[in-house]
Image (spheres, rainbow, N blue to C red):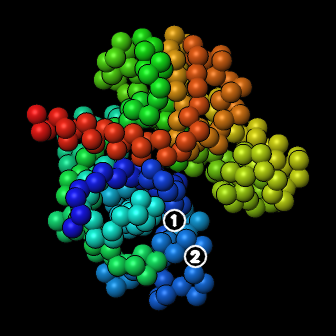
Amino acid sequence: MENSIIIGCDIGNKLIKTASSITPAGLQKLTGTPVVAPADPQEYLLVNGEHYLVSNKRIAYERDKSGSQAHLYLAMIALAKELRNRNLSPNSEITLAVGLPPGHMADQEVVNHYREYFRQNGGLYRFQAGGVSYQVKVKDLIVCPQAYSVLFTLPQNILEYSSLRVVDIGGGTVDTIHIENGTPDPLMPSLDMGVIFLYGKIFIQLQNRFGRKISESQVDEILLGKQPFFSEEQKQVVRYAARSHMQEIFDGFRETGEDWRSSYVVFCGGGSALLKEPIQELAGKYTGAFQIVDDVCANAKGYEVFAHMALKARRK
């Protein structure tokens, strides 16, 4: 085994991210090897004698991702990609850094359950990805707070604001954290208002108004300014639904007692990248000032910094 390295893995309901890779959170079980090889060979997984292929059909939303083996298998694929991208051996010993919503971090039972999920079989992952045999030993596992970990990727001048908020818009949830004079507020509200719920609204509206079906990836393309095969009127329905959803996010947090108008607000997560236009349109009214982090891998990168600091603190 090689010397231990730290790999952050942001396991979302829509995407699985490491510092240098993005994998759709969909997994299809096969009866054998795939008839057509995936564009990225690492997205074909052989584990425990079973064959799996990454799919654009997302796994159904789960609040508790440890309810099945699917997210563990997707994490294996993400680790294989990251080891390949770093030119590291498939037989590596690592510290794995994963995340939970900040509000869950205070519940030690939840943290321990999540840790046990990723340390099954003593933390030894044996699998094949893209025909390459892997034996990855998870020597240590650090559970990191989502949203908060993004702070470690921000410039120092942003961290100097006396009131700083991070709003992490993911697939399933929108997680927030408030840092006041360098100290996190123990109240860390989270709402089930991620982009997965936006997709559902759009599917219904396009079906009812136009008799059209649309995929999540096509919704993404429209929100990112690309031009799939939909009329301007249909695309306008998508954009209006996105704006309405972002308005509901602002309203939802205001109803919890949150007031972002006296804070510098950092929007991050894959949902923030998709909702960039409505955020830019609406945030001026609801925040003191704001910025949008375009890097959807920011949490995974922040996990690595957080894990490094946690390991360093242990050694003292």
Residue 93, x across and y down, in percent: 24, 62
Q: Is residue 204 above or below residue 295?
A: below
Report crowding for label 1: few under 14, some 14 to 19, many 20 or more residues within 10 A (C-alpha): many
Residue for badge 1: 26
Badge 2 amino acid: Pro
Q: Quadrant of residue 131?
A: bottom left
Report crowding for label 2: few under 14, some 14 to 19, many 20 or more residues within 10 A (C-alpha): some
Residue 12, x across and y down, in percent: 46, 51
Secondary structure found at label 1: loop
Q: Of tags 1 and 2, which is closer to the observer?
A: 2
Quick one: quadrant of the C terminus? top left
Residue 100: numbered disc: none
Along the line of sight, the residue nearer the viewer: 117 or 202: 117
Residue 258, x across and y down, in percent: 47, 18
Marks 1/2 in contact by CB < 8 Å: the verdict is: no
Distance from disc 1 to disc 2, alpha carbons, whole Å, reads 13 Å
Residue 263, x across and y down, in percent: 50, 14
Secondary structure found at label 2: loop
Q: Residue at the spot x=57%, y=13% of the render? A: 288
Residue for badge 2: 38
Confirm whether residue 100 shows in the render. no
Confirm whether residue 263 shows in the render. yes
Badge 1 amino acid: Gly
Quick one: quadrant of the N terminus? bottom left
